[in-house]
Image: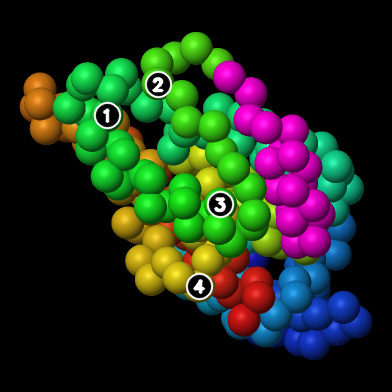
Amino acid sequence: MKRFYKDASVQPTKGGYRVLLDGSPIRTQMGRQQIVPTETLADALAAEWAEQGEEIDPRKFLFRDHADFAIDIVGQHRDETIAKLLAFAETDTLCYRADPDEPLYRRQKEDWEPLLCHLEDKHGVAFQRISGVMHRPQPPETIATLKSHLEQLDDFALAGMTALASLSASLAIALLSDDEAVNDPMLLWRDANLEEEWQADQWGREEEAEKRRRKKGDEFSAAHTFMLLAKS
């Protein structure tokens, strides 16, 4: 699609801020008003439009897609969104580990245990650690407490959480990424990919796999930045 506007600007409006293209407000991909909670997020959205060239490249709309998801999907289906997030807790990457006699298990325990312990202390929950691939459900009280926490988040935070949990296969990683005690969210991305990194170190790195991992890492970083912009 060719660029059809000259200027992108931000305007305060009821309920937040919106982006204008040549003075006309943007709508989401499903036709709803695209109103976001903070001016900093609106500025970032406007920048995405302003930085487009003569041809619009949808791949450059990193934040727009998250904002539209928050409005079009989360805002209309909060209960379903929270249920999908809780499903990641039931099969959380940080909880499923190698057999205790394997070297990978020691590495997982060293890197993952402090993260899980911090999350448990913060939310007053207990996660089940599982060795092997056989599924074991998390304690019902843990799921209930996490559900209560997620229900307190706004649509934009839940949208960011959904992207982070999907990329990392871990609700724990998504929750930790919104924790002030975590200084570098990309270290969480490294932790989420610990097993893949371990295998690559043991057997060598394959170019296409590395490229896919870098792309997902960029998406993880963008989702985390979106969450920060939506609450700053």
Give the distance between the C-alpha atoms of the residues marked 1 and 4, in whole angstroms: 28 Å
Q: Name the quarter where the C terminus is drawn.
A: bottom right
CA separation in Å, label 4 and label 2? 30 Å
Chain part drawn in magenta: 136-153
Mark 2 residue type? Ser
- Estimate the spatial distance between the alpha carbons at disc 2 and disc 1, rounded to whole Å: 8 Å
- Is residue 166 in view? no
Query: Residue visible at 31% across and 19% down?
Result: 99
Q: Is residue 226 above or below residue 173?
A: below
N-terminal label among 1 and 3: 1
Q: Which of the labelled discs sits on residue 105, or is there none?
A: 1
In the structure shown, which secondary structural element does the residue marked by tag 4 occupy? loop
Q: Which mark is residue 120?
A: 3
Q: Nearer the viewer, residue 202 or 117?
A: 117
User: In the displayed structure, does residue 29 sit left or right of residue 131?
Assistant: right
Q: Residue at x 37, y 27 (%)?
A: 97
Circle 3: residue type: Glu
Q: Earlier in the sequence, mark 1 or mark 4?
A: 1
Residue 2 colored magenta?
A: no
User: On the image, numbered disc 4 is attached to which residue?
Assistant: 180
Viewer-side label of 1, 4: 1
Residue of label 2: 131
Question: Tags 4 and 3 in contact by the CB under 8 Å rule?
Answer: no
Secondary structure predominantly adopted by residues drawn in magenta = helix
Q: Nearer the viewer, mark 4 or mark 2?
A: 2
Alpha carbon of mark 2 to alpha carbon of mark 3: how far?
Answer: 19 Å
Q: Mark 4 or mark 3, which is nearer to you?
A: 3
Residues at circles 2 and 1 in contact by the CB criterion of under 8 Å = yes
Contact between marks 1 and 3 (CB within 8 A): the answer is: no
Sequence order check, earlier mark of 4 and 2: 2
